[in-house]
Amino acid sequence: MNPVRFPKREGGSSVEEKDRVVQQTDQDASQSRLSAVEAGYLEDPFAKLFVAGEVQRRYPLINRGTYIRTTAIDKLVNNFLSSSPRTPKQIISLGAGSDTRFFRIASANPGVIQNLVYRELDFRAITSRKIASITTSPELQSLLSPQDLTVDQVNGSLTSKHYSIHPLDIRALHPSADFSASINTSIPTLFISECCLVYLSPTEADAILKWITTDFSSSVGIILYEPIGGDDAFGRVMIQNLAARGIVLKTLKKYSSLERQVERLRVLGFSDGQLAVSVKGIHDGWVSAGERGRIAGLEMLDEVEEWDMLAAHYCVAWGWRDRGEVFAGWRDVGRGDH
């Protein structure tokens, strides 16, 4: 997961320890991604550049989940980028952590980058670590435009023509937030949140979505990857296991189903479309039979029933407000792919 990281707060070491536990999930996510790459599920030459030490091989059901999550989000992102290709666009990744998406896009489709600004928001401890990886890797640096490149590793910021990293507590994002004045809010913008908003209170998470639909005047869309279904037996065990590590899924109760995720997006201003599909639904309905056969052949999946339950407890939800045709293809993403 690439969750939001909490800043230091007053209130004692127990709060600080919980914050550190949540921050550690970024490294967990990086290890899971590299595991899926090493096992043959995904192609990502940049995953290893953000992982310290040896790869920690994950269970097959975790590798498969990482594959489905990445494939689904990539499909939605690529649809956004390919629509109206000459139109300047922006992507803002919330709690981006060590995500490699910008570098994968820049490597695979450099033409797209010319009309794209890609921004990543996270806490300084995380952004500083990511910038350290970038500045020590010629491979990563080669994908950044040297013009207007400014790096401040101490404060955790990097700015360039097409890619910027901002050290920011995303809980400061709400309608009329100060951050809005420092970026372009008048071009079509896609937001990505992969297991990020779920660590905020419902009030804080809702304020961020309202910020998007209030402060941005052009087309906006958001992709959420989140857990659901915390009110059944499997979900309760999932919550207990995370709680044992000090991790609390604060929005899960309020947005515990696909229907609630869809309603959330509608109410908070993504008025032109809202959809949500479980990871199981994506695996069964979006991935072609040939590709399902390929990934099934990579590793023996003994825990088929556990996979079905786990995949039913995570979802991808997406919503949009279109003032043009930038998100016109989102309604049909995934249909007819199998």
Image: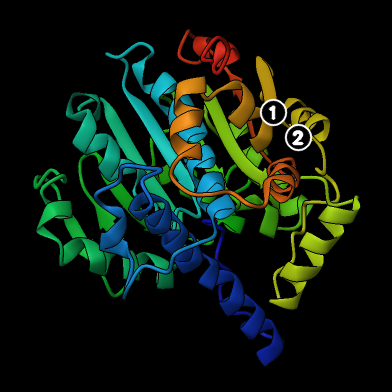
- Looking at the image, can residue 218 be seen? no
- Place of residue 98 in the rendered image (x, y in percent of width and height, measured from the top left): 39, 58
Q: Is residue 266 above or below residue 68?
A: above
Left or right? Give the position of 81 relative to 115: right
Packing grade of label 2 (10 A; few <14, some 14-19, many >=20) is many
Q: Which residue is mark 2?
A: 261
Numbered disc total: 2
Helix, strand or loop for disc 2: helix
Front of the two marks 1 and 2: 1
Q: Which mark is residue 276?
A: 1
Residue 258 in the image, given as x and y percentages of width and height:
78, 32
- Amino acid at circle 1: Ala
Image marks 1 and 2: residues in contact by CB distance under 8 Å: yes
Q: Dot 1 lies on which element?
A: strand
Give the residue displayed 61% in from the left and 39% down from the top. 224
Q: Residue at x 52, y 72 (%)?
A: 24
* Farthest right residue in view: 232
Residue at 75% over, 28% down: 262
